[in-house]
Amino acid sequence: MDATFAQTLWITLKLAISTTLILIIIGMPFAYWLAYSRFRLKPIIEALVSMPMVLPPSVIGYYMLMIYSPQNWFGAWLVRVLDIRLAFTFGGVLIASVLFSLPFMIQPLQTGLRSLPNSLCEASYTLGKSKTVTFFRVLLPNIKTSIITAIALTFAHSIGEFGIVLMVGGNMPGETRVASIAIYDEVQSLNFAAANKYAFILFVISLVLLTTIYSVNKKQDTWKMM
């Protein structure tokens, strides 16, 4: 296997896996808060979470790039205090990817939690269980389908990201060049054989993930009908 090809695939998988793992950690408690909170400004927060689904990636990428810039106070603070540069680095792309993929993790989890009857929480609290124990021992086991869907959608979305990566990370081989950008480059160079290899792998991964989602949902629907 060509070294550049393998390296590009590894960066693509590393970005998708890292994004998914981070969003699992922060997405579950965030989805729980959105599902059960009565905060008056919650609709605004839900709208902000969903913004990546309607905004062009270039818009979010532009604002992220401005935030990362040393000419911005935050970017300047990162360079001056922590000696960290996020623009055109894998770390900067990862942060942008997490924000851009947030709704794909949050919305399935939030929908799953909202579908549960209130009696589950009430019964757990009656037995003296805390909110944390109730969340992990009672609620999460009852939304396994939503969890699998959220993870699969987040991973599939992350692995195919193009605009946000190009805006924030550029096209730096070995650092920020992912498969979706490599496809574009190879087509521009009329190297259709290489483009086809990248495209086929992304196609197979996406097909497997979507098949998994539909299979799990079908089993869940069958179980409910019994």
Image (cartoon, rainbow, N blue to C red):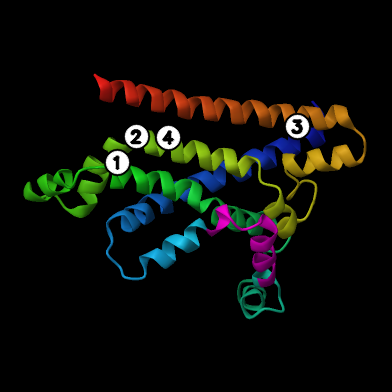
Residues at marks 4 and 1, CA–CA distance in whole angstroms: 11 Å
What kind of residue is marked 3? Tyr
Lower sequence index among marks 4 and 3: 4
**Which residue is label 1 attached to?**
140
| Residue 148, label in figure | 4
Residue 125 horizontal side relative to residue 10, left or right: left
Do the CB atoms of the residues marked 1 and 2 lie less than 8 Å apart?
A: yes
Mark 1: few/some/many CA within 10 Å (<14, 14-19, 20+): some
Q: Earlier in the sequence, mark 2 or mark 3?
A: 2
- How far apart in space, not on screen, are marks 1 and 3 (Cα)? 36 Å
- The answer to if 61 sits in the magenta stretch is yes
Disc 3 on helix, strand or loop? helix
Going by the numbered disc 1, the residue's amino acid type is: Leu
How crowded pointer 4 is (Cα within 10 Å; few <14, some 14-19, many 20+) is rated as some
- Residue at image x 45%, y 41%? 150
Q: What stretch is highlighted in magenta?
A: 51-66
Secondary structure type for disc 2: helix
Kindly check if marks 2 and 4 are in contact, taking CB atoms under 8 A apart as contact.
Answer: yes
Q: How far apart are marks 4 and 3 (CA)?
A: 25 Å
